[in-house]
Amino acid sequence: MADVIVTLNVDTSQISVQNVDSNSNFGQGPGISNEDFLTRVNAGDTVIWQGVSSVTPSDTVNIININHSGGSSVFSHDNLPGNGLHPEKVSGAVRNNAKGETEKYTIQFNVFNNGTRRPGLFSIDPKIQVNQ
């Protein structure tokens, strides 16, 4: 059982509701969309989602919740709330009996650029898969 960190990189100076995919990523290679990004974990692991600015460390990306949106639910709850800190993160423990399961989920986040919150609530829908 380990901590698995999923880091969302966001261009905090350019992101808007209309351009989320072109201004955020998980560091995946070219040709892999945010929706096709897959995190592989083991049963019992704790997944921690965090956001960082790809522009300046003084900007903030708050991961405010993780919501199950398709496939199996590999966590004990379908909605995982943020920890309320700044920057906000979300964590969840993978069920011990989730081996081999794949879940599609939605990351919801907000962004502060130069101390001002950018308008909108941003969403990305990646996947997580539990190893056999």
Image: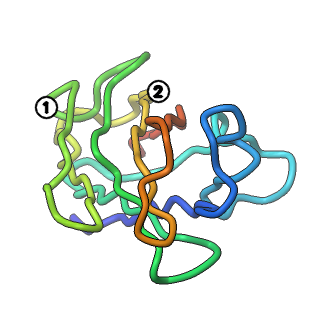
Q: How far is disc 2 from disc 1 in space, using C-alphas? A: 15 Å
Residue at the image position 52 percent from the left and 59 percent from the top: 8
Tell which residue pokes out farthest to the top in this image: 70
Find residue 97 and name its label. none
Count residues near mark 1 (Cα–Cα under 10 Å), then give few for <14, some for 14-19, many for 20+.
few
Image height of 86 relative to 124, above or below: below
Left or right, residue 52 beside residue 82: right
**In the rendered view of the protein, which quadrant contains the N terminus?**
bottom left
Tell which residue pokes out farthest to the bottom in this image: 57
Residue at the image position 17 percent from the left and 64 percent from the top: 85
| Residue 33 locus on image (x, y percent) | 74, 41
**In the rendered view of the protein, which quadrant contains the C terminus?**
top left
* Total residue callouts: 2
Image height of 45 relative to 132, above or below: below
Left or right, residue 84 beside residue 36: left
Which amino acid type corresponds to the residue marked 2 in the rendered image?
Lys
Residue at the image position 13 percent from the left and 31 percent from the top: 76
The structure's colour scheme is rainbow
Image height of 108 relative to 102, above or below: below
The tag earlier along the polypeptide, 2 or 1, is 1
| Residue linked to disc 2 | 104
Find residue 76 and name its label. 1
Residue at the image position 45 percent from the left and 40 percent from the top: 128
Which picture quadrant has residue 86?
Answer: bottom left
Q: Secondary structure at mark 1?
A: loop
| Residue 108 locus on image (x, y percent) | 40, 38
Q: Front-most of 119 and 73?
A: 119
Image height of 77 relative to 116, above or below: above
| Residue 36 locus on image (x, y percent) | 67, 36
Which amino acid type corresponds to the residue marked 1 in the rendered image?
Ser
Q: Front-most of 81 and 37?
A: 81
